[in-house]
Structures are given as structure tokens and as C-alpha cells.
Amino acid sequence: DSAAAASDMPSFPSSGASPQKQQHNARRRQLIRQQRKSLPIASVEKRLIEEVRKNDTLIVVGETGSGKTTQLPQFLYDAGFCQDGKVIGITQPRRVAAVTVAKRVAEECNDQLGKKVGYSIRFDDSTSNATRIKYMTDGLLLREALLDPLLSKYSVIVVDEAHERTVHTDVLLGLLKKVQHSRSIYANKNGKILPDIQDQSQYFTLKACQGTKIDPLKLIIMSASLDAKCFSDYFGSAKAVHIQGRQYPVDILYTYQPESDYLDATLVTIFQIHLEEGPGDILAFLTGQEEIESLDRLIQERARQLPPQRSKIWTTPIYSSLPSEQQMNAFKPAPAGTRKVVLATNIAETSVTIPGIKYVIDPGMVKARAYNPVTGMESLIIIPVSKAQALQRSGRAGREGPGKCYRLFQETLGIDDIIGFDFMEKPSRTAILKSLEQLILLGALTDDYKLSDPVGRQMARLPLDPMYSKALIVASEFKCLEEMLIVVSMLSVESIFFSPREKLEEARAARKSFESSEGDHITLVNVYRAAKECLEKSKNANAKEKTMEKALNRWCRENFINYRSLRHACDVHSQIQGHVQQMGLNVSSCGDDMVLFRRCLTAAFFLNAAMRQPDGSYRALATSQSVQIHPSSVLFQKKPDCAIFNELVRTSQNYVKDLTRIDPVWLAELAPQYYATED
Ligand code: ADP
Ligand code: MG
């Protein structure tokens, strides 16, 4: 049995330890070995490894506590996936989980943290050259991918807790799909890269790695509860396996009437359990640090009034921003004569499993991100948990034996499905506030609402939507201001393309000659340049202005271009060109380097990024809104994995218009202030 064999490896320094200590260590190792063997995942180790070998992408679904996060990476290691010094990377949406799990797994391996097993989160890296099993946050892997676009040191990447679906998970899944593709191309060509790869940026990436041996990348998507089919479709009908969980019965108790103060109700319930129920630890779910801290204080106060002969209460908080040393307390057994009360955020729902829990208190609330499309602001609001969440929470009570869950709400509460649940729009705030917030995000205003220097001052001089002003400034840095001027002018006017209903096919055919497979922005640049060429031609023929306009008008009709809109765009163009020249910005062209231009569009319009979802729909990353590509876009037919857009149109559906295909990793690279944060 390889699970046991792994733990039988020589123990790390025990020389110098007292005989008692050595005996204690031996007992603990024995206990861990037994625990590992009894996990549901232990009985399917062989099959899992077989599936990983057979499939480049595998989806693993299993009940929380079945051993996915701690065991699977060890199985992979034992099966030889770290030969040639390759690393198994496991991403977690939360820092806490990365740290606690790495510590646990290091102990299971009977090794010091930072050797074979380590974690890496922002500002805290425990790994060394010897590390083969590396737990990290989604955000960190994204950043690594910027430096090594093939993620060449990894043999396997495990995306854990995929059901959590943060912005990072979305970006990461899109990215990994791409990395996997590049690596398989690379492996198939034996390290020889021919420039027949569609995406230019990919070609250069691959070329840079020429000569090093790179195997295909194995991807494992893991989750406690997810629609396996939807992820499977996203990865080209990837294989999905389920791990049967083990669950003891949990008694569920509801309150008779709604609790007006759930914090107080939680307090009362904790003491009720403590005084009336048998041994076993308590886990209470709260919405955030403040609540946890104030409840902790209330518990301490009331605990002082307990009669001295009663057992004591020992509270341990656990939430994301708590220092990791303190987080680890939650995993320690309660001191003799005390009952442990863990005060946790929804981090303890699926991310971490705390041993010893017999009683769960669920006030039924959770803090969630909500986006207000009217104000453009994201805020944290407290909302009722979903039914799936309530189920997960109660399940925590039945891990080691029969348990009890106290739901501090009535039986009917709970939103049916939190995944894909669209938050309702909150009442709209004023338009002024909206624009102020956008200006701060764009770097035009400082936090105290003053114009920033130079960006804000420059933007203020441009008679444009702030997002377009910002785009011009960014473009001058990227040295593609000529192209951006065209884009901004063309986007500032009514529809450029003219598609009369009775000549739809002809109009479509005419547009084809301008179309860029990279998207609508470059297509607009092509139209503008073609129009300019037409004007130049008649100018060279010494035509009078009137004749030139006539020629342009005819050209527009032939090409199904809206003449008035195009004229308007030319006017806007010469106006803002004047402005940017006065501002001293450098109007240069990127020539044919459309990767550069697309990167520039990404840097400018990062607030409007959309990712393709496993089910084929799109999600606007900043708003979490579900959107579709508008049929007028050139990307409507060839759907990109990730794109930026300029306009959101709302009809019966949310549509995005004016799109350009981008690489999801550019978001983290070019707008780190927005995309490369953790937690
Ligand atoms: P899953 O990822 O399937 O939810 P895990 O691999 O996280 O499961 O946990 C498997 C088991 O390992 C848990 O049920 C628990 O008994 C044990 N475990 C995990 N982390 C710790 C820890 N930090 N301390 C003690 N036991 C732990
Ligand atoms: Mg897990």
C-alpha cells in the first residue's frame, strides 16, 4: 500500500530528542498513517493514477474531507510525476488553505515544511529547490505564468476548489488551457517549432524555449461540488471521476422564528451546546473578521460567569487575513478540560477541514461580492447562504461521527444555487459617484478626489470619455497612438458599418475584406486606413475637394460603410489628434505588430474584460455579469477564450460589442492593480 509506504520514509532529525519525545513522534506518525489509510480517497489511489496517466485533463469531484487536497498530490509524487525534478503545483483560491494544507502534508510526509512540500503565497514563500509538491494561490500561479509562459517546471497542475470561481480561477483556467495546448504542440514537435502557429505571441513564447525538453502538462480540476459536465465541456469533454465520500448522520435543527440578531443567537447556541451536550468541538460560521472578533469577546465575557467546575471554552478564530500562525491554532486539539469553539468564515466550508468538529452552528449568512453595474462599484454585502452552502456547512458536523447542525434560520431560507447566481442590482447611486470611481480606477484621481499628475491632468484636457482618454495616454507609452487615435475616433461615432436588411449578404461580404480575426478594433483600423487610401488616391489625381468627397462617398456605398459616420470619425480624429499633439504625446505607429496593439488595448480597457465560461457563455470579469458576444462582432463566429470589449448593450440579454481577442495572462501583467491581487 503506497500510502503507508510514503509515510514509512526515514523520519527527519529526531536525534537529540528525548526518548519520550521520540515515542510521542512515533505515536503521532502511526496515527497519521491510520488517518490517511481511512480516507475515502485512499481506496481509489491506483485508479486515480491510471486516469491521470490516460487523460491530460481530469476532473475530480469528491465530498469535502475525502482527501483530495492532501492526498492526491502525494499519490502523484509516489507515482513518479516528479521525476526529472518536475513539480506538482496545487492552486487554492485562498492563502490560508495553501498554508495549512502544505503544513499538514509536510507532516504527513514526515518532512520539514519547505523541503519536499512547501507553499508559496504573495509575500510568503516557503519553497526551496527541493520542493516537489507546491501549494499556492491562484494569483501566484498567474504571476509565475508571466515569467514562464509554458509553466515548464510543472508536470501537473491541480486547480483545487474550482467551484469557488473567483476572477482568478476564471483567468487561470483560460490560461492553463492555453499552456496545455502550447506544451502539447511543443512536445509533438520534439522541441522544433515551426511558425505555423496561429497566435504570434505563442510562437515567440515557444521559440524562446526551443531546445529544452518539455512534456505535455497534466491538468487536474478538483472540487467538492461542481457541475462536472460544464467543466468537462470546457476542456473538450475531459474525463470526470467521483470519489465517494463518507458521511455520518447529522441532525439538523432549525429555529422556530427568524432570528433578528444572528450574532446573539450564535452566542446563545454556543453556550447551550456547551452546557447541555456531550463532548465534541463546535464550529460556528460567521461572515467576517469583525463579527468573529466581537463574538469572541462576547464569549470570553460570558465564559467568565461559568461555574468553576464546568469545563472551559477555548475559542480559535480562522479567517483569511489572520496571520497563518494563529490560523493553525484551529487545527490543534483543545487543551485538556476545554471545549474548542472554532469561529470561522466560509473558509471552513470546503477549503479546510478542521478535525474534531461535532457541532456546527450556521447563522445562514455569508459575505459576498456584489457588483453594482450602475455605479461600477464592487462591494461586500451580507446575504443568505445558498442551499448548497448550508448543506456543505452541516456536513462539517458529520466527518468523524454523528453530529448536529444548528441552523439559526427557518427551514425555507436559502437561495437555490449560488453558482451563476446573479446579484440583483442595488438601488442606483448618482452618476457623479460612478464617474468618480471610474476615474480613481483609471488612475486619473487620487484617493482624495484630486486630479493625479500627470495622468489625471492629461485626461482632463481631452474632450473624451475618461476610458478613451486613458487609452490614448496608454497608447503613447505603447508607441501605437496612431492606431489608438483611429480606434477612439471610430468608436466615438454611430455605427460605421451599414447593413441594410435587404442586402445583408452583400454587406457581410463587403465587411470580410476589412475583417481581422483578432477582433473589431483592428477591423475598424483597417476600414479607416482603406478610406484614407481612397482619399489619397483622388488627391494624387489632383481632384478638387468636392470630387474627393464624391469618390469617398462612392467608396463607402460600395463597401457598405456609413459615409456620415465615417466623416464624423475623421473630424473627431483630427480634433483629438490636435489635442494629443499639444499635450506633447508621441503619435507613432506600431506597424504590423498587432500583438503589441492588442496588449495596449488590454492595458487601456482592462475594466472591460470578459472570459469564456466552461458552459460557453461569457462573464464580464469586473462585474461578474453574464454576457454574450453581440452578433455584429467579428468575433461572434470565432469565439475567443478571453476578450476586452468597449460596450455593453442590454436588451433581453447582456451583449458586449467592439471586442478584441486577448491573452488572459495579459490582464494580470498589464493591470496588476486590478487583477493580480490575492484573496
Ligand atoms: P478534501 O480536499 O477532499 O476536502 P483534505 O485532503 O483537505 O480533503 O482533508 C482530508 C482529511 O485530512 C481531513 O478530513 C482531515 O481529517 C485531515 N486533515 C486535513 N488537514 C488537516 C490539518 N491541518 N490537521 C489535521 N488534519 C487534517
Ligand atoms: Mg480540499
Image: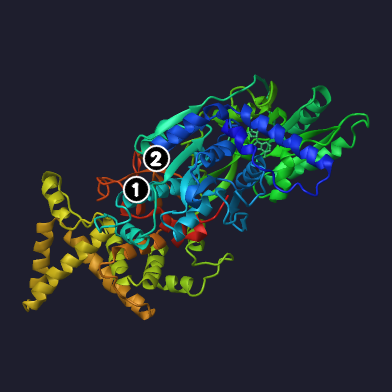
Tag 1, which secondary structure?
helix
First of labels 1, 2 by sequence position: 2
Residue 602 in percent (x, y) is at 39, 59
For mark 1, what is the residue? 184
Residue 299 in percent (x, y) is at 81, 38
Label 2 neighbour load within 10 Å: few <14, some 14-19, many 20+: some
Residue at left 33%, top 71%? 481
User: Which is nearer the eye, 37 or 203?
Assistant: 37
Residue 656 in percent (x, y) is at 34, 48
| Residue 431 shows up from this direction | no
Q: Classify residue 9 as left or right of residue 306.
A: left
Residue 56 is labelled as 2
Residue at left 52%, top 71%? 452
Tell me: residue 280, above or below residue 611.
above
Label 1 neighbour load within 10 Å: few <14, some 14-19, many 20+: some
Tell me: residue 74, above or below residue 196.
above
**Occupied quadrant, residue 475:** bottom left
Gap in angstroms between the C-alphas marked 1 and 2? 10 Å
Residue at left 70%, top 47%? 12
User: Badges 1 and 2: C-beta atoms under 8 Å apart?
Assistant: yes
Q: Amino acid at mark 2?
A: Asp
User: Which is nearer the eye, 443 or 54?
Assistant: 54
Tell me: residue 103, above or below residue 511.
above
Tag 2, which secondary structure?
loop
